Image (tube, rainbow, N blue to C red):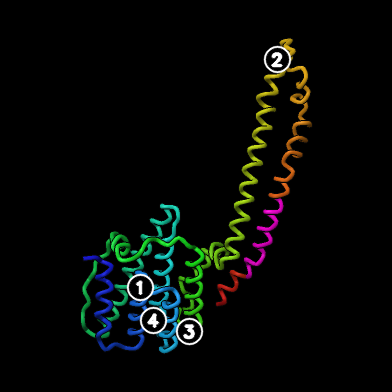
Amino acid sequence: MNSFLRVEEEVCRAMNYSLPSDLELSITVFSILLRYLKREIDDQEFLDDVSELCASTECSDKTKVFLDMSVQLLFFAGKGRLFDMQQKQTAYRRLCVKILHECYLYLRDWFEAETNEQLKEIPYTEHLWDDFQLCTVANDRSRIQFWKLMLNSYRLLRKHHCLPEKAFITKLLLRHSRESYVFRNHCFAYFFQAICSVTALLGVYLICSMAKVLYSLLVELPYHRLLLYSGSKQYDDSIDDYLTLWHQLNSFALANRECLIGICIGLFLLILMDIPYSRYVKRIKSI
């Protein structure tokens, strides 16, 4: 049987018992999270359901630890499903499978301690990600949507005091603060990507132009000198252009003035956009 569905089935079975409020909250949130990961509910419905649960029940220390683990699962699952480098995807997927299994074990041990009933033991397997993919739609492609959900979920749990004081998810967000800073809204993300793309293209063009100048100085210049010294008159008219280093540098700067100005403007805009970054990091810490 599909291991991901087995986890969901056992969680749903645990919800049929009479449970303490904090354990019931944790199991319900986990059930909602699994439904969201399968894309049975959308982003807003997921946030609304979690907000309603957190607002209606006071979180114990155990619940706060579990919610911290749950939002980590949301993070790693989202990163693993983004269109990214395969090596990075593999790392995030492995972490997603690991934290999913740890969440289940955490709830199972807590459930058995409270009810003296037993849930099925589901062994850890790296094939859990493949089973998870069989239950859901294709991978996500929007980092903007991913970071919007992550930051809203983090704010929501902080607002209702549902995370421990030193939550691990805070460290994760700070570690990826540069990416979340760029992709926190559509306009800023598109503008940032456009500036980076244009600046990079201008830089590539500048490097190609510089390579052409170096080729003329290091290859063509010695060649024409040999022709000149051998008495050949074929290149007499243009030999001064190759013999003059200053002429080559002046021609390079003149021919690439628009490119140099564009690169300077692009770098200036990137630095300007990076000024509020320190304030953004402080705001994450204080949420």
Q: Earlier in the sequence, mark 2 or mark 3?
A: 3
Q: Quadrant of the C terminus?
A: bottom right
Q: Position of residue 104 (x, y in %)?
A: 30, 73
Query: Which residue is disc 2 drawn over?
Result: 227
Q: Earlier in the sequence, mark 2 or mark 4?
A: 4
Q: Nearer the viewer, residue 213 or 25?
A: 213
Q: CA distance from mark 1 to mark 4?
A: 24 Å
Q: Is residue 30 left or right of residue 159?
A: left
* Circle 4 residues within 10 Å: few <14, some 14–19, many ≥20: many
Frontmost of labels 1 and 4 is: 1
Q: CA distance from mark 1 to mark 3?
A: 25 Å
Q: Earlier in the sequence, mark 1 or mark 3?
A: 1
Query: Which residue is disc 3 drawn over?
Result: 160
Q: CA distance from mark 2 to mark 3?
A: 82 Å
Mark 1, secondary structure of its residue: loop
Q: Is residue 133 left or right of residue 286?
A: left
Query: Which residue is disc 1 drawn over?
Result: 40
Residue 88 position (above or below residue 213): below
Residue 172 appearing in the image: no
Q: Quadrant of the N terminus?
A: bottom left
* Residue 229 lies in the magenta-colored region: no
Frontmost of labels 1 and 3 is: 1
Image point 60% across, 52% down: which residue?
197
Q: Are marks 1 and 4 in contact (CB under 8 Å)?
A: no
Q: Amino acid at mark 2?
A: Leu
Frontmost of labels 2 and 1 is: 1
* Residue 271 lies in the magenta-colored region: yes
In the picture, the disc for residue 63 is 4
Q: CA distance from mark 2 to mark 4?
A: 83 Å
What is the magenta range? Answer: 264-279
